Image (tube, rainbow, N blue to C red):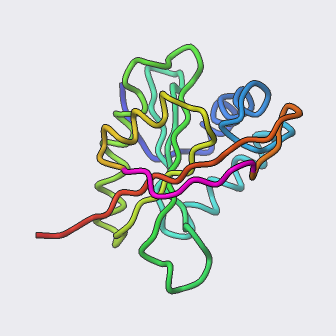
Amino acid sequence: MLITPAASADTEAISAIYNHYVATSHATFELKPIDPDEMGRRVIDTVSQGYPFLVCHDQDQVLGYAYGRPFRPRPGYRHAVEVAVYVHPDHQGKGIGKRLYDQLLPTLFTNGAHSLIATIALPNEASVRMHENFGFVKSGHFREVGRKFDRWIDVGYWQFLHHKD
């Protein structure tokens, strides 16, 4: 397996992974699938703001992706980064998310992040477990803030603070 920055050739596979979650889960509150062109715009937007967008490949297949993006747009939030990871449904539980975060998180800290924030629609035990294994701690819980599949969904925030020695 190889982890690289996302390339334009990856956007079709990235959007297919994302669209699986759009259609089948509350991991995203997006309600309609997005096409590869829109995903390409999102990747370019992320990278143009100075944030990494990484892809895990096994030969020619994209197994997952992860990225950081600004937590909020105001300049005072510039050291807070929201992180996300999505894994191909056929490859969940194989350590792909961990491999992506093993590379993503240190890069974010090197680039000046102090606080990493994961927004997790609940319940999502696998995501909670992975983030907590990296040292994220639950820092907030909002009840019934999302609506998908005709039901209200809670959202939790997990945070990791970078303390330099």
Residue at image location 51% in from the left, 22% down from the top? 60
Q: Using the image as rendered, state which of residue 95 and residue 161 is in the foreground.
A: 161
Q: Using the image as rendered, state which of residue 55 and residue 149 is in the foreground.
A: 149
The image position of residue 17, as x and y in percent, is 65, 29
Which quarter of the figure has residue 16?
A: top right
Is 91 situated above or below 38? above
The image position of residue 159, as x and y in percent, is 41, 57
Q: Using the image as rendered, state which of residue 92 and residue 50 is in the foreground.
A: 92
Is 11 situated above or below 136? above
Residue furthest left as drawn = 165
Residue at image location 68% in from the left, 55% down from the top? 42
Q: Where does the C terminus fall, quadrant-wise?
A: bottom left
Residue at image location 61% in from the left, 38% down from the top? 122
Which quarter of the figure has residue 4?
A: top left
150 sits to left or right of 127: right
The image position of residue 135, as x and y in percent, is 29, 47
Give the magenta part as a residue range.
Answer: 137-144
- Judged by its main secondary structure, the magenta piece is strand
The image position of residue 73, as x and y in percent, is 62, 77
141 sits to left or right of 38: left
